[in-house]
């Protein structure tokens, strides 16, 4: 399975063709997609056409982009013009957006070859992809286990070699956790560095798009392409994309790496063991390990599960069957709304809409949503204090390795706990990434999470690269 | 079952959210939400009186655009995706039983 | 229609107005689609306008500038502000929430002056976006109830709005009408909106309550569908009366929204909203705070034109007329005050200048064809009693028709010359002798008899007598 940078080098030099590369990936899809179900839609014909065009351009000596010929999969909550975008929900089944998300435009301009739209937990709400309305995705390393979520399909696509890279979205850990469970690299960048225009909104102040790749260098390369200011997104930071590839070999000598001493409980011992090994690796590479406290960490789950559903309840109100998507007809408008949303939304989505609506409603706002916003401030302050003493922090990405299907679906709260280590960075708007670092006792991959402060991507990638070298 | 949220409230909230719940669904939803809200009570232990709410991850301000027209979507492409359309417009059932 | 709502039994009226104004920008509030009335349905659309999945709003800078002009013209403080989502379901609201301003609006604490130096507070003037338009079909009245289906046009969705909320300082329906008229004049003057009520670019919601002096304000009702300045007055008069009658017959006023029906002249209950009032406002996470720089605010303020009230005041001072009177209002409304100023600077009699323009220049527009010096000359002729006021009126018409000219020559051509005072006295004496009966009646106090005497004199003088001068002579003779 080729790395992204190898493909680009091969295609631009002529030692291989985009067509050959995409055929190879499509063949792998053909072989195992039936078993894994990473995709909602494989766009094979268009992918071959796009690849052929790249080859033509290379042959004609025309300039091709930084991702020339790279087969990429997109989470099915990013708008692709004329190509079905469902968010793995029945309410959008069959919908073809009339516009491209900004990241999609960037990928196309860079010469990437989009091979398909990947499966997710419905509207990005979940941690196992079991909430998809179109059936779950299997973990390519063990198909009795979940790939994680909500970007399970994108993680699996890279893990199974269906795509050289993929994009996912991360609101509470939805890139990092599946990356850890599938043994790939997954990055959530600083909030505001990658445009959200065209990303179907779940929680507007938390969502970010990010890459899944098989290694850190590929992630840095892809992130450089999709980052940067976008005038179509008011929350987009007005700065150009940071240079990441150039710092990958800098190492961590002299860096201070934080160990969180008040980490929430519930982490499996084998995962914790890998975290210890990661700290050892950092020490061996010349970094100092510094203890930090993040006292508000234990309240982050609560804050997140009030803020995210609140924003989601508002963002999902537009799915009313009026202008697009599926409609269930009724005699009057109100009945039409109710019937459409009842049949179109799955249980988890309904649950979060209810929770969010309640948290925002008159009389409860201050007690719930209002308080959650204050907890958000607390964790942000905790991090700010910590980053005075450290350059980066390491935690487990997920409290356990990939779990079996159905093992957490009975109790929503049990599922929510999957995100306990990833949620704080979304609340603070910081970057974080998961790097594969060994396996657990069940031989399933363990991911270590590297955290950095706002716009601290360069530091984060230096640490991640070092971890990868030691893994 | 805890009393964090009552079934009446759940029904009221479902109407606000335009989600119709059967009595069984309302029952189940009530117990699940109550369980969650019980758990979320942990933040009641915090003294948040002097804490400023945080609404923005990154402190931007004054993001604006110039008043320049850009032609965007093709009407037909959009209406082709509409559940119901007529004479260039989206069609919906009447608002009887609706609050105007 | 009464000018002042006089309610019986000591009831007093309290009115607040919420006026929504569509801003005269090229594009919408949060997206770059065209902002234009009357285009083919759904031709000014984009992902943001339609509330498509993944769409994001970006604020229109020119809309902010226009909103600041409005705020400053209304004497508001312009302050750092934020945007909120107001959540509710309706098909003309494409995202199922409206982006508006809630606890930190752009403009606060202003006021607007009405004639008679009545000050109406303006609580706030904030930015928000307009909804699409729904048309109802089937049924009988084209209204919602009883319709078979509705069709939606989103051209208007996302058009920039400023909502101007007055304090409940209005006490009569006349004041309400004046407020709307003055607000409209201000909006036009600063170029913020074309403020056409008939096209919906200016919409009024009226809040009405009644109470007795010394008691707290009563429960208020909001009245919608008030589509003209005249309807503002009529709706208030009706609603105030309805509330008084209701209370006096033992009922209570329910806080509700009512619909004004211009045809029947009544307000009716819209179906009351159960739960729909919980808008679950929260800060819009897709936008960032708007903190206008002081230099920008100063620049906008400096560029404001002289506002209608100030223009009326200046005109009134120049010409010796009432600043709240009709001539000042009419002349400024037509934009002819600059012209009057020019006439006066050419030596024109100030009072006559403004009155001539008020009375005869309705069709002329802001730059009348008649050269200022020609009109000035005419006012001087009348002032110096070289022509009578009746003759002056005729000459004025001639002047306008000809687009100017030498008024002295025109007067001569018409054979106009005013009679001097001596000749007038003689004519008056002759008339008194000829109509002793009328004279006696007039001396006894019957004002009507004056008309007969003046008429006789005018007839015998073949119009050369100045009616006003004659009247003055008769009056002074009577008092002797």
Image: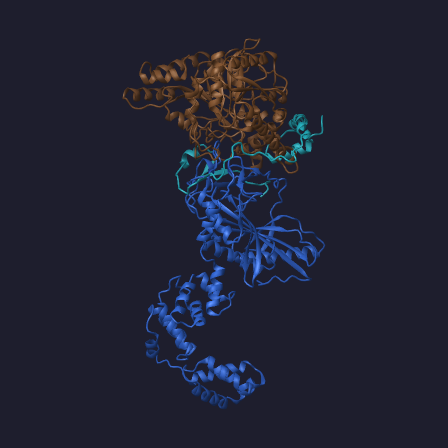
Chain colours: A brown, B cyan, C blue
The reply to whether residue A140 is in sight is: yes
In percent of width and height, residue A435 lies at 50, 16
Q: Is residue A316 above or below residue C8?
A: above
In percent of width and height, residue C125 lies at 53, 49
| Residue displayed at 61% across by 61% down | C5
Position of residue C46 in the picture relative to residue C212 (left or right): left
In percent of width and height, residue A104 lies at 42, 27
The mark total stands at 0
- In which quadrant of the rendered image does the N terminus of chain C lie? bottom right
The reply to whether residue A147 is in sight is: no
Position of residue B36 in the picture relative to residue A159 (left or right): right
| Residue displayed at 31% across by 16% down | A14
Q: From this viewpoint, which residue is outermost toward the left? A: A60
The residue closer to the viewer here, C414 or C257, is C414
Residue A164 location, quadrant: top left
The residue closer to the viewer here, B6 or A69, is A69
Residue B14 location, quadrant: top right
Q: From this viewpoint, which residue is outermost toward the bottom? A: C433
Q: Is residue A32 above or below residue C253?
A: above
In percent of width and height, residue A200 lies at 49, 29
Q: From this viewpoint, which residue is outermost toward the front? A: A254
Position of residue A128 in the picture relative to residue C419 (left or right): right
The residue closer to the viewer here, A246 or C57, is A246
- In which quadrant of the rendered image does the C terminus of chain C lie? bottom right
| Residue displayed at 59% across by 27% down | A382
């Amino acid at each position: 399975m080729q790395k992204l940078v190898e493909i680009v080098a091969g295609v631009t030099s002529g030692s291989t063709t985009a067509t050959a590369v995409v055929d190879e990936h499509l063949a792998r899809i053909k072989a195992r997609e039936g078993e894994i179900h990473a995709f909602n839609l494989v766009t094979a014909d268009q992918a071959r056409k796009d690849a052929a065009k790249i080859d033509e351009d290379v042959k004609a000596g025309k300039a091709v982009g930084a991702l020339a010929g790279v087969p990429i999969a997109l989470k099915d909550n990013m708008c692709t013009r004329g190509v079905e975008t469902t968010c793995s929900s029945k309410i959008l089944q069959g919908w073809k957006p009339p516009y491209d998300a900004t990241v999609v435009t960037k990928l196309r301009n860079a010469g990437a070859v989009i091979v398909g739209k990947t499966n997710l937990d419905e509207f990005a709400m979940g941690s196992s992809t079991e909430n998809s309305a179109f059936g779950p995705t299997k973990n390519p390393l063990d198909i009795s286990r979940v790939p994680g979520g909500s970007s399970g399909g994108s993680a699996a696509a890279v893990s199974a070699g269906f795509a050289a890279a993929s994009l996912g979205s991360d609101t509470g850990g939805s890139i990092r956790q599946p990356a850890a469970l599938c043994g790939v690299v997954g990055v959530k960048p600083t909030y505001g560095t990658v445009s959200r225009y065209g990303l179907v909104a779940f929680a507007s102040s938390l969502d970010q798009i990010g890459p899944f790749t098989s290694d850190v260098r590929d992630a840095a390369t892809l992130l450089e392409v999709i980052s940067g200011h976008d005038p179509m997104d008011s929350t987009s930071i007005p700065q150009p994309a940071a240079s990441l590839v150039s710092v990958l070999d800098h190492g961590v000598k002299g860096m201070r790496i934080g160990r969180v001493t008040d980490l929430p409980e519930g982490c499996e011992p084998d995962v914790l063991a890998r975290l210890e090994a990661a700290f050892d690796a950092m020490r061996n590479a010349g970094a100092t390990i510094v203890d930090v406290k993040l006292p508000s960490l234990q309240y982050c789950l609560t804050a997140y599960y009030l803020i995210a559903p609140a924003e989601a309840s508002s963002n999902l109100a537009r799915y009313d069957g009026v202008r697009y998507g599926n409609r269930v007809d009724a005699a009057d408008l109100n009945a039409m709304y109710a019937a459409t949303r009842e049949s179109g939304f799955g249980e988890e989505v309904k649950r979060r809409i209810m929770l969010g609506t309640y948290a925002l409603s008159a009389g409860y706002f201050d007690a719930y949503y209002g308080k959650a916003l204050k907890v958000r401030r607390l964790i942000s302050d905790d991090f700010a204090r910590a980053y005075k003493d450290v350059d980066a922090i390491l935690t487990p990405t997920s409290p356990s390795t990939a779990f079996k299907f159905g093992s957490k679906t009975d109790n929503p709260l049990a599922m929510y706990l999957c995100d306990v280590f990833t949620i704080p960075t979304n609340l603070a708007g910081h970057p974080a990434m998961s790097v594969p670092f060994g396996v657990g006792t069940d031989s399933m991959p363990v991911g270590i999470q590297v955290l950095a402060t706002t716009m601290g991507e360069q530091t984060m990638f230096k640490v991640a690269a070092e971890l990868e070298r030691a893994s | 079952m805890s009393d964090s949220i009552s079934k009446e409230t759940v029904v009221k909230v479902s109407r606000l959210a335009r989600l119709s719940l059967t009595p069984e669904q309302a029952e189940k939803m009530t117990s699940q939400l109550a369980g969650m809200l019980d758990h979320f009570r942990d933040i009641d232990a915090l003294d948040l009186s002097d804490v400023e709410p945080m609404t923005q991850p990154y402190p931007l301000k004054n993001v604006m655009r110039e008043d320049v027209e850009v032609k965007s979507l093709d009407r037909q492409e959009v209406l082709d995706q509409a559940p119901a359309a007529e004479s260039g417009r989206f069609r919906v059932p009447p608002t009887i039983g609706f609050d105007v | 229609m009464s000018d002042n709502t006089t309610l019986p039994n000591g009831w007093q009226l309290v009115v607040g107005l919420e006026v929504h104004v569509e801003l005269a920008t090229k594009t919408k509030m949060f997206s770059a689609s065209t902002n234009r009335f009357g285009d083919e349905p759904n031709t000014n659309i984009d992902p943001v306008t339609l509330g498509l999945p993944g769409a994001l709003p970006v604020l229109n800078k020119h809309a902010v500038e226009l909103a600041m002009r409005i705020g400053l013209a209304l004497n508001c403080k312009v302050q750092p502000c934020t945007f909120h989502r107001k959540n509710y379901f309706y098909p003309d609201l494409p995202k199922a929430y409206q982006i508006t301003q809630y606890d930190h609006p752009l403009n606060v604490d202003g006021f607007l002056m009405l004639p008679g130096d009545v000050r109406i507070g303006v609580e706030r003037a904030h930015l928000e976006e307009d909804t699409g338009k729904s048309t109802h079909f089937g049924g009988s009245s084209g209204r919602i109830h009883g319709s078979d289906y509705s069709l939606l046009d989103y051209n208007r969705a996302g058009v920039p709005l400023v909502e101007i909320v007055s304090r409940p300082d209005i006490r009569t329906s006349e004041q309400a009408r004046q407020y709307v008229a003055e607000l409209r004049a201000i909006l036009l003057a600063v170029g913020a909106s074309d403020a056409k009520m008939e096209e919906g670019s200016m919409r009024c919601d009226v809040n009405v309550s009644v109470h007795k002096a010394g008691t707290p304000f009563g429960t208020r009702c909001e009245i919608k569908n008030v589509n003209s300045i005249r309807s503002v007055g009529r709706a208030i008069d009706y609603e105030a009366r309805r509330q008084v009658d209701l209370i006096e017959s033992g009922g209570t006023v329910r806080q509700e929204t009512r619909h004004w029906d211009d045809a029947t002249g009544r307000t009716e209950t819209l179906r009351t909203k159960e739960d729909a009032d919980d808008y679950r406002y929260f800060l819009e996470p897709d936008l960032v705070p708007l903190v206008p720089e002081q230099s920008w605010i100063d620049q906008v303020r400096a560029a404001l034109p002289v506002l209608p009230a100030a223009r009326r005041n200046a005109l009134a001072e120049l010409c010796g007329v009432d600043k709240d009177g009709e001539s000042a209002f009419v002349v400024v409304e037509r934009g002819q005050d600059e012209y009057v100023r020019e006439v006066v600077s050419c030596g024109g009699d100030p009072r006559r200048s403004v009155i001539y323009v008020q009375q005869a220049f309705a069709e002329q527009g802001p730059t009348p064809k008649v050269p200022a010096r020609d009109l000035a000359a005419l006012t001087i002729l009348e002032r110096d009693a070289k022509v009578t006021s009746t003759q002056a009126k005729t000459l004025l018409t001639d002047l306008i028709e000809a687009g100017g000219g030498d008024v002295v020559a025109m007067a001569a051509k018409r054979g106009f010359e005013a009679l001097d005072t001596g000749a007038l006295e003689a004519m008056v004496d002759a008339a008194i002798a000829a109509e002793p009966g009328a004279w006696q009646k007039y001396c006894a106090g019957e004002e009507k008899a004056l008309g007969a005497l003046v008429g006789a004199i005018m007839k015998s003088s073949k119009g050369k007598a100045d009616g006003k001068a004659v009247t003055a002579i008769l009056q002074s003779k009577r008092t002797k």
